[in-house]
Image (tube, grey):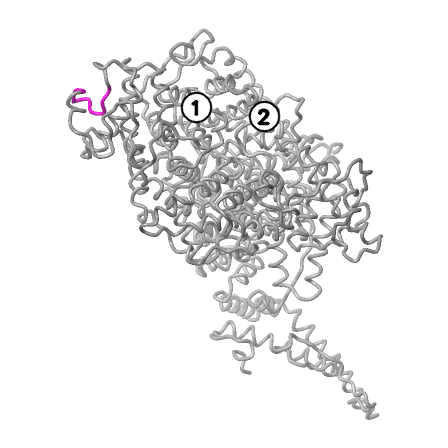
Amino acid sequence: MQLANRYGCQHLDFGHAVILFVLSLVEMLIDCILDDCGLLNISTHEHGNIYTKNMDFGGEGPHDSGDEHREHLRRKNILMSIEVVEKATANKIAQVFLRLVYLNTSSVFSIFGAGKGSCWVPFDMFMENAMDGRHLHAISSVEFLTELSKTLQVLNRATWQETFQALWISGLRLVQRGPEALEGPFPHLYSRLCMLLAIIPLSVATIVKEEVDKLDGGMVSAIKEELVSSLQILVQFSGLLSPPPATVHFANTAARKAAIVLSNLKSGNENLYGYSKDSSAIKAVGNMLHLIVEACIARNLIDTSAYFWPGYVVPLEASSQAQESPWSSLTEGSPLVELKDALMVTPASSVAELEKLYSFAVSGSEEEKLAASKVLCGASLLRGWNIQEHVVQIVLKLLSSFLPLDSGSDGRYVQHMPMLHALISGISSVDAVHILSMYGLVPEVAAMLMPLCEIFGSLPPSDHRSCNFEKASVYSVFSSAFLSLLRLWKFHRPPIENALSRHGVFVRSELSLDFLLLLRNSRSALKNLSNVSKSSIFQLDPSLQKPVYIDSFPKLRAWYFQNQACIASTLSTVYNRPNVLHVANNILKIICHKVPKDGILSVNPQSTSNSSMGSSPPPGVPEDMCQWPTLPAWDVLEAIPFVLEAVLTACAHGRLSSRDLITGLRDLADFLPASLAAIVSYFSAEITRGIWKPVMLNGTDWPSPAATLPVVESEINEVLAKAGVNINISSRPRSVMPMLPLPIAALISLSITVKMEEFSHLHGIIGQGIEICATSSSWPSMQIIGALWSQKVRRWHDFIILACSQSPFTRDNTAVSQLIRSCFTSFLGPLVDGRSCYVANRGVADLLGKTLDERARLVVAPGFLYMRSCRLFPDNNFVCEEILKVVIERARALANDCSSERPGHLRSDCMPLSAASSLVEQISSLAATMLCHAGGLNLIRLLYEHILPTLLLSAGEDKLGSAGHVCSLFEGYALAYVLLWSGASIWGVGETSPAYASIYTSKRQRIVDRHLEFMAKVMEGNIVLGCGETTWRSYVLCFVGLLVDFVPAWILEVKLETLQKLASGLRKWHKGDLALSLLERGGNKAVTSVVESLLGYAGAQFSE
């Protein structure tokens, strides 16, 4: 029958031969039926099963002979063939064979499922988590949101319309939660709008493209129609569509664009999208829907027919003519330099305008190049949502034009120093860094900044006493590039300390420079920088995609290893580089010039001042104690740790006053701002050692927080209480003077001296240092730090309270436990006497909070506080166990709600099982999302390999399955759902993009296989359980059923031996259908096992 050739099989084993034989018989019978009916098969394999009616238009058809007997036989033959096909396909074994064909040749078939889904909270929590600017992301939010959307569409059994609608609504809620009135150094409203108007549309575009590639003909238009429907239905959510005050102008501009098109159509103007003199008088009222629609039109997701939706355009009587955009003037030929200020505050509206600006940046005069660089990093980068991915690519393309470094090219960099300074400063703001992180470009930016740090850190500066961030100089460019680079990874974190769980598994996922370079190089190898680069017309030069290694930058490498050494241990008393000690001593004499000569400090305590400074200094180190050394920045940075050790030790022993210490550090930071990195790193490391005594904050030697500390502590307690956490953050008596360990006191005092105009450059460094100091010290210091800062910047008061409210969770597991339970209560409602209590206020709005009212006191929802604090939890293993404990409690409460063991007059209150099943999914989706954000991939690995198996093996009074039969059933179901949702949220449900797979999906196969192997060993009796049998059976059956129904791609990756063991155990439980379904989805490797088991089963029945 030539089955191998007919069906394109290279290797045909016994199992494949059997199922293809059955398929061929069914196909031949169907072909005979169609042939007898007059439908001729053109070519099954070449033309996709297309049949045509066999007609003879000349009037002589094949059945027009008049032979009644032949016609009778033909009809009888059709009926007999249909009966044979019906009987063949009704056989259970034949059905399994045909299903195996379908599952293993999915490209031949296409399906489009629909269903109902309600668990969309992972969207909201992911988006809120992405707004935390303290933690940068190694992968694009576009890619992560794309995979999350595909996962939730499958798990919720939802249509794409429902999925897209959930995305838009979550994005709108994110914007409405935007703390616009909350001032502080964190990503503001523009980052939230970037998520709604750029990241979500790009994710939708990726999904639509993938679906179009998979579907045929009418199905393509179907998914586009679903997208349009998801947008049109948003008009029902009028409360979410109200634009924040800062976006009213943009919304009205988007609505005006549609009004102009309608006006041109009405007036008969052939150019519907052109502006005329009359257009300046047209105005319209816009909302968030208009901004979303324009974002979709800009990415070719929908067309301008959206302008004609009913009620889309709401005209407004124009009181004045609309002002012309400065970008129109630029494209018409107006000078760039004259328009610079206006262009910096007005985002570009089209790619053509960006191309015009890019031409100035590449081939314009020096003045035009500088202006173009500043404009690119202005409003277009922060607020040009419709073309933001193009702006990001242009900025990086322009920055990359200075790469790679060529030997002897220092003059080129000095010549273009103003332009480089503008670009680096432009991408260094809090919002800009966060937006680059959302686009997943942190590794690429790091790779571009490294050579700039290397070259400018090696250049000697001009003679100067201080460095101004606003002016281009060797030190300012180096400091901007260096501090920007360090903000992209946790430079002050110890490489191994605080990274191991009690199981010896890494559970923290802090970015390191090594990891960033590895990720960047792997992306280049995949030729897949990000989804953004694929959707943008701008591409980086292929020559710039070569691997980047830290060994290529010897100066940076030397500092990198020195920094790690300083973090890991104290400075060595023996240092064999006298040049560095000379530089350190010279810096000491300058910053401590008020110290009497007989008490002059030295980095070498064994030598006197005469002997330490008596030898001739090395070249470049001046003798004049008031003259800063004109040395390359790397040489200065290498000496700074020795300076810091000397001044901190002198201050601790009373030889240097606190005022002189802070003044000296401030002078050092003014001279070389990059030195702040060394200061933060050194102080952060020293506080972890616990060797420095606390100092009294008396207002004389050190600043005093006494004026605001009681208010700050009271407000922190109030915020925590409203989030469901009732603890006392202050353990000291009111009469005791506040104290801080010396390194923290020095760092916070130094941070208070920073000028506000410099803070956007320095906050990422100082803020990280204060955070690590506060979380690494056992001393309760965060409220004191908050009180000091609230005295300096009163308008940041609410931001400071919010930041300080996160500190208890860094060391107190009781607070963590209360917060976790509060999250479940706010989302699902409280538990009363072991039963669910339903209240009106619950769901996403109560979990993450609503719009922040400027007139209201600071109210922080528990889910919002969890998302801001979860990365700081001291023990992620505890977090996982606590979440599972709450899940079990909730499962038992559902069992009680469904139980029929009630008095007769109360049974009408029993919850239907369908409602209970839906609530199990909601509980599981929340639990899984909380786990994923707390510990990421490594915590989910722990869940599969250690925590959940340990829970099932544990015995005791509170063991699983000890609360009754119904409760045991619900326990197993809930745990199975949590496990599946957790894995799917991280790994995806099927094939993922190469960049996503390299970080997440590649770990899936081994982890899932290990867990299924554990299940198989228990079923074989090789491992003794501690939990109840009912809980175990319900867990196994539910988890395997979920694998079969939702994530069959996972089963394909599992070893055949594991699947066979698991199927054998299921058959012993008389779950043969589930065992068959499991093996059917094992891919080609499992076909023979399925066939043999079925034939063996049939043979056994026949013998009976």
The location of residue 755, given as percent across then percent down, is 47, 24
The location of residue 305, given as percent across then percent down, is 76, 54
Judging from the image, what secondary structure is the residue with disc 1 in?
helix
Q: Which residue is mark 1?
A: 751
* Numbered badge on residue 951: none
| Residue sitting nearer the eye, 1 or 414 | 414
- Extent of the magenta region: 601-609
Judging from the image, what secondary structure is the residue with disc 2 in?
loop
Residue visible at 45% across and 15% down? Answer: 731
| Residue sitting nearer the eye, 856 or 1041 | 856
Q: Please say whether residue 1070 is visible from this viewpoint.
A: no
What is the distance, in whole Å, between disc 2 and disc 1 at their CAs?
Answer: 30 Å
Q: Amino acid at mark 1?
A: Ser
Q: Is residue 735 magenta?
A: no
Residue visible at 66% across and 31% down? Answer: 850
The location of residue 395, given as percent across then percent down, is 51, 47
